[in-house]
Amino acid sequence: MYQLKNITLHRNGHEVLHIEQLDLPANGLTVVLGHNGSGKSTLLKMLAGQFKPDQGQVLLNQTEISRLAPRALAKQVAYMPQQIPQPALLQVRELVELGRFAWRGFWQPWQADDQQRIQQAMQAADVSHLAEHALDEISGGERQRAWLAMLLAQNANMLLLDEPSSALDLAHQYQLMTLLRQQTEQHTCTVIAVLHDLNLALRYADRILALRHGRIWFDGTPSELLNHPKLDDLYGIALDILPREGKHPVAVVA
């Protein structure tokens, strides 16, 4: 699990993150919401070991994350950034294979389970038919799914995803979120995903963490967020919550 204690982070003289205490348990699907510039991506980068706070501690399973070697961290945490790199001439299968290097390195021989995990990851992310395609030959949404396959092949018990649905069409957005839920339910891993779509969060999340101006504005269940007396303040726009019998409620702009 993650523990954040007395965290502050500044950029260009401005405080971009201030978290006194945050515990993220080793299970379930947590969605991070918030307006642009609220600190969502900064928080995820800190959890991934990309940023070090100016003050405070980021602990992963009671170990300071900055003390973990890259391969040791990669065995526990798989991270998809908001801006996905596009390695020139790399094929989809080759990208997915990179997910196994945390376990095998460059010199250790691959085992049968490596190929099995790669095939399963590509199938789960719906990119098997793109295996021999170069990354610069496929669409942005397909590249996003290829990166997700690499993370699944990495077989880490913590998935950190920064706006994983941003380039996906509507069908693949829901397919992605269903897949992430399955990962938490079937493989006992934790998923922490930054999203902009409130309705996706309400439908799939176990827990919602909302940031506002770099601070925790809300931390609780989707139903608790729906009943928040100042929900409109989250994005600075009036929202109506439409109940649907036997289905998840839907948030719409009032």
Image: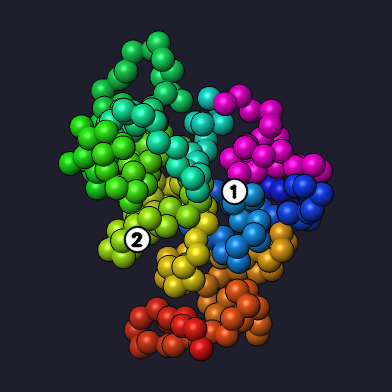
Asked where in the image residue 169 lies, by quadrant, the reply is bottom left
Q: Foreground residue, 30 or 44?
A: 44
Q: Earlier in the sequence, mark 2 or mark 1?
A: 1
Q: Foreground residue, 224 or 85?
A: 85
Name the disc covering residue 75, or none: none
- Start-end of magenta stretch: 45-70
User: Is residue 21 at least partly visible in the picture?
Assistant: no
Mark 2 Cα shell of 10 Å, populated few (<14), some (14-19), many (≥20):
some
From this view, report whether residue 239 is shown above or below residue 15.
below
Q: Position of residue 148 (x, y in %)?
A: 37, 44
In magenta stretch: residue 64:
yes
Query: Quick check: 170 left or right of 77?
Result: left
Residue depicted at x 55% and y 80%: 226
Secondary structure of residue under mark 2: helix
Placement of the N terminus among the 4 image quadrants: top right
Name the disc covering residue 173, or none: 2
Q: Position of residue 165 (x, y in %)?
A: 40, 57
Amino acid type indicated by mark 2: Gln
Q: Tell which residue pokes out farthest to the left in this image.
A: 129
Asked where in the image residue 38 lies, by quadrant, the reply is bottom right
In this figure, which residue is indicated by the disc labeled 1? 44
Amino acid type indicated by mark 1: Leu
Q: CA distance from mark 2 to mark 1?
A: 20 Å
User: Is residue 103 at least partly visible in the picture?
Assistant: yes
Residue depicted at x 46% and y 25%: 102
Q: Position of residue 194 (x, y in %)?
A: 52, 57
Asked where in the image residue 246 lies, by quadrant, the reply is bottom left
